[in-house]
Image (tube, rainbow, N blue to C red):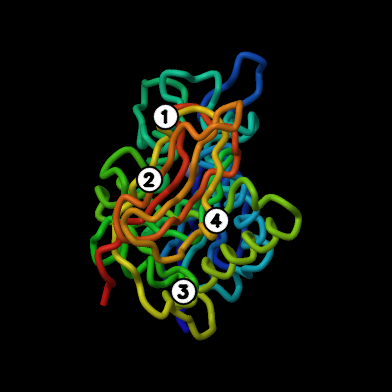
Amino acid sequence: MTENPATITVGSATAAPGTAVRGGIAVTRLAGGAILEIPVVVLNGARPGPCLWINAAIHGDEPEGTLTCQALARKVNPENLAGTLVLVPAMNVPAFEAGQRGNPLDTFSYDLNRIYPGRAEGYLTERLAWVHAQWMTKVADMEISIHSGGAHSYLSETIFVNEDAKSVELAKAMGRGWGLVLSAISPKGNPMAAMLEAGKTGITVELGGRSATSPEEMKRVEATLVEAALNVMRHYKMIEGEPHYAEFLWKGVQEALLAPASGIFIPATGVGCQRPMKKGDAIASIVDVWGDTVSELFAPADGMIFGLRALPNITTGEWCCFYAKLNGRRD
Ligand SMILES: [Zn+2]
């Protein structure tokens, strides 16, 4: 096998072939004197191969990807790796520190996953996005953004693709249990879109969130995500082993059902993620403080729920159900 001749640099992390190096992508210096930087781990393989870049905590209340990056850094030995694995365990650092979706101090560009790749001279989150994008689009061949339902919802195994052949292949490489492959919600504003624009590819994956944060459930979510990432690396021959695949891949689009009324969100009996539903099937009701039903939600089309609100308190307009409108299978 040929040697990997390339040293890989991301921010302050420079990794020679066969080594793993931690570092950071500097954003700015804060008023208290601390440097704001995005943590990064570069695992540079001893042999040549593609560069897989994994982003976690683009939303600060979604630590599932962070735990996945930590586990991958422990499990993957760069001496047995072909290509490079770049791990970003917490992308929106101020949001991660606050345990919130976005940086609470940056109300002008709050959601990093809507403003990416930002602007060099924009608001703070835009600048953070910009420096991250410079490194990622230069170094990476493919990118996986790991999301979850965060503080409000639980999301089951779901992948969003650009619908180009490369992103569908990357989705397929996630393996067994990852058969729900939907079209990207937004063609712009996120790392996947920036990778496509750079002539590369990426996917966005969802798993976990509220109601799956008990010790056992958190472990299950982490183990599932770690296995999927390792399977991607097997598929692209970055590590040894036989990859596995989902039995079939669904094709569809997301419809996020927003609360028509405020109150308490109560899912209907038997409702759960990834169970086929018919248009008009009951999903949930919302009751007011007296217990009277003020609204009912029904399946908008044939398909399946892939995410459900887990915090029962709800206000008009908030997310309550993530529904996949299915239009067949991918072959
Ligand atoms: Zn998210």
Separation of residues labelled 2 and 3 (CA atoms): 22 Å
Above or below: residue 117 compared with residue 271? above
Separation of residues labelled 3 and 4 (CA atoms): 30 Å
Image quadrant for the C terminus? bottom left
In front: label 3 or label 1: 1
Which of the 4 quarters of the picture holds residue 12?
top right
How crowded is the residue under tag 2: few (<14 C-alpha within 10 Å), some, or many (20+)?
Answer: many
> At 65% from the left edge and 32% from the top edge, which residue is drawn?
97
Residue 175: mark in rendering: 3
Q: Earlier in the sequence, mark 2 or mark 4?
A: 2
Q: What residue did someone put label 2 on? A: 191
* Amino acid bearing label 2: Pro
Q: Earlier in the sequence, mark 3 or mark 1?
A: 3
Q: Earlier in the sequence, mark 2 or mark 3?
A: 3
Asked whether the residues under the numbered discs 3 and 1 touch, taking CB atoms below 8 Å apart as contact, a structural biologist would say no
Rendered location of residue 329, percent (x, y): 28, 72
Asked whether the residues under the numbered discs 1 and 4 touch, taking CB atoms below 8 Å apart as contact, a structural biologist would say no
Residue 317: mark in rendering: 1
Q: Earlier in the sequence, mark 3 or mark 4?
A: 3
